[in-house]
Amino acid sequence: MPQAPSATNQNEIICSCCGAKLTFAPGSMSLKCEFCGTMNEIKIDQSKMAEAVKELDLEAALNNIGDEQLEEVHAVKCNCCGAETTFQNNVVSSKCDFCGSPLTVKQDNTVKQLKPKAILPFEIDSRKGQELYNQWIKDLWFAPSDLKNVAKLDSGLTGMYMPYWTYDAETYTRYQGKRGEYYYTEEEYRDQDGKTKTRQVKHTRWYPAWGKVHVSFDDILIPASNSLPSHFLDNLKKWKLDKLVPYDEKFLSGFKTETYSVDLKTGFDKAKDVMEDEIEDKVCEDIGGDEQKIESKTTTFSDLTFKHILLPIWLCAFRYGDKSYRFVVNGQTGEIKGDRPYSAAKIAIAILAVIAVIVLLFMLMSK
């Protein structure tokens, strides 16, 4: 039967059976003792669930953040890539999991940051992450033939909780533009044999358009980290945020956490860019017709709220030739995004094959 874990004065989680240190077991709601194997259940306080996913007033937080909302975070900042990650208490040196540069506790930095309200626990463990990596390597198109044999992970997988912001908003946009409607006329032309033929020509008739659209946004997810290139975290989309639980340091045991480097206001500016695309789509839909032109628009925002949450990833790197390639695994769903090498020879052969097919078809059609 799972036991409830207890905590030492040093805030280390210890096993209720043997006193050894525990680590969170992905895919469960328990801490596992690596010494005796006992599963120590993490009990979720259901009374805190609503508070964990409660949307907070964005404008109030931007104007004045109370001390009760802040916590002191001891993070080690990498001088090469700027990533700020936490060290476990007994670690005095390590390497940066984002760029591989050496780190020591001498670079320790204490900052005050907003406390995360909720966390999405790991469901994918390191063994499953390794399997996903191997399959990913195997399935890559136009990869060098020897890649799967030589692309070994530099130092295994690193489990990392990454900071994110979520934003909600009600938007109202007034616009002016034009609605284009197609009409067709017939015209005569001569083909390559000199014969006279007719064809339809498309034209567009434009009409003025104006109006107002309302778009609601819920949980626009913005990475609060600059440590990885944007195409990594921005493209991890398959998060199940309904699985969020109240923030509890027990879930962090055995994993690292990055502190946020994208502040609340900057994160909202990025969220507005995401909203802008959907607002434009809604305006074009409202204009109607076959084509649309937006000449001007003004958007007002209301009911602005946010959350600060932590989401799980496995961060990995492998070497091929003289270059290191990084990729990340969504620690909840197993979704993978990463950089990879290409085989110039395979790409050249594929291009030549396509050209050969086109030439062959042209010759057959010319007969």
Image (cartoon, rainbow, N blue to C red):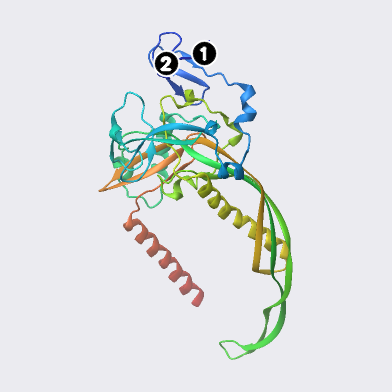
**SS at badge 1:** loop
Labels 2 and 1 touching (C-beta < 8 A): no
Q: Which mark is residue 33?
A: none
Residue depicted at x 43% and y 13%: 15
Q: Residues within 10 Å of mark 2 (few under 14, many from 20)?
A: few
Q: Name the residue under label 2.
A: 9
Residues 139 and 171: in front is: 171
In the image, what residue type sits under mark 2? Asn
Question: Where residue 25 sits: x, y (%)?
Answer: 46, 23
Q: Is residue 306 above or below residue 231?
A: above
Residue depicted at x 34% and y 33%: 156
Q: Residues within 10 Å of mark 1 (few under 14, many from 20)?
A: some
In the image, what residue type sits under mark 1? Ala
Q: Is residue 121 above or below residue 343?
A: above
Question: Where residue 31 sits: x, y (%)?
Answer: 47, 19
Residues 215 and 187: in front is: 215
Q: Give the foreground label among 2 and 1.
A: 2
Query: Total marks drawn?
Result: 2
Q: Can residue 29 be seen in this view?
A: yes
Question: Where residue 203 sits: x, y (%)?
Answer: 68, 79
Q: In which quarter of the image is residue 95?
A: top left
Give the mark nearer the N terminus: 2 vs 1: 1
Q: Mark 1 points at which residue?
A: 4
Q: In this view, does 214 lie above or below 153?
A: below
Residue depicted at x 54% and y 42%: 165
Q: In which quarter of the image is residue 244?
A: top right
**SS at badge 2:** loop
**Separation of marks 2 and 1 at Cα, in angstroms:** 17 Å
Outermost residue toward the top in this view: 17
Residue 305 lies left or right of residue 317; in this view the side is right
Q: Can residue 313 be seen in this view?
A: no
